[in-house]
Image (tube, helix red, strand yellow):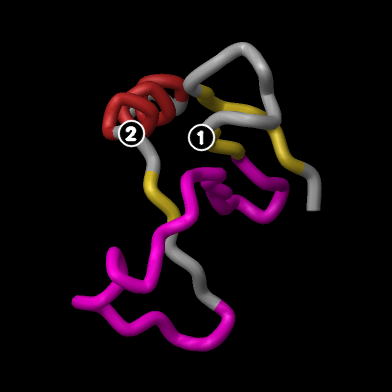
Amino acid sequence: MKLTRVAGECSNRRSCPTVYASDRDTIVVQGYALTPEDLAEITLPEGENAVEIPLSLLKEAARAHGV
């Protein structure tokens, strides 16, 4: 998979929440891991994870894609 950085919360590209576009026409999100307590109200299927990112990052990524 080839990833292209779309939006990020800081200049260090590896240590902050970041949104990437993939060559598979998908979006990959790097964020903060959630605890079991955070996830108490949802059930994640096997193979899925949940991460937390700032709303401002999602807005920046949408703007970068012209949405």
Residue 10 sits inside the magenta stretch: no
Residue for badge 1: 17
Q: Quadrant of residue 34?
A: bottom left
| Quadrant of the image containing the C terminus | top left
Q: What kind of residue is marked 2?
A: Pro
Image position of 52 with respect to 41: above or below? above
Of the numbered discs 2 and 1, the one sitting upstream in the chain is: 1
Residue 42 sits inside the magenta stretch: yes
Image position of 34 with respect to 15: above or below? below
Q: What kind of residue is marked 1?
A: Pro
Residue stretch in magenta = 21-47
Q: Residues within 10 Å of mark 2 (few under 14, many from 20)?
A: few
Q: Residue at x 51, y 34 (%)?
A: 17
| Lateral position of residue 1 relative to residue 27, left or right | right
Q: Quadrant of residue 15?
A: top right
Q: What secondary structure is the magenta-colored segment mainly?
A: loop
Residue for badge 2: 54
Q: Disc 2, disc 1: CB below 8 Å?
A: yes
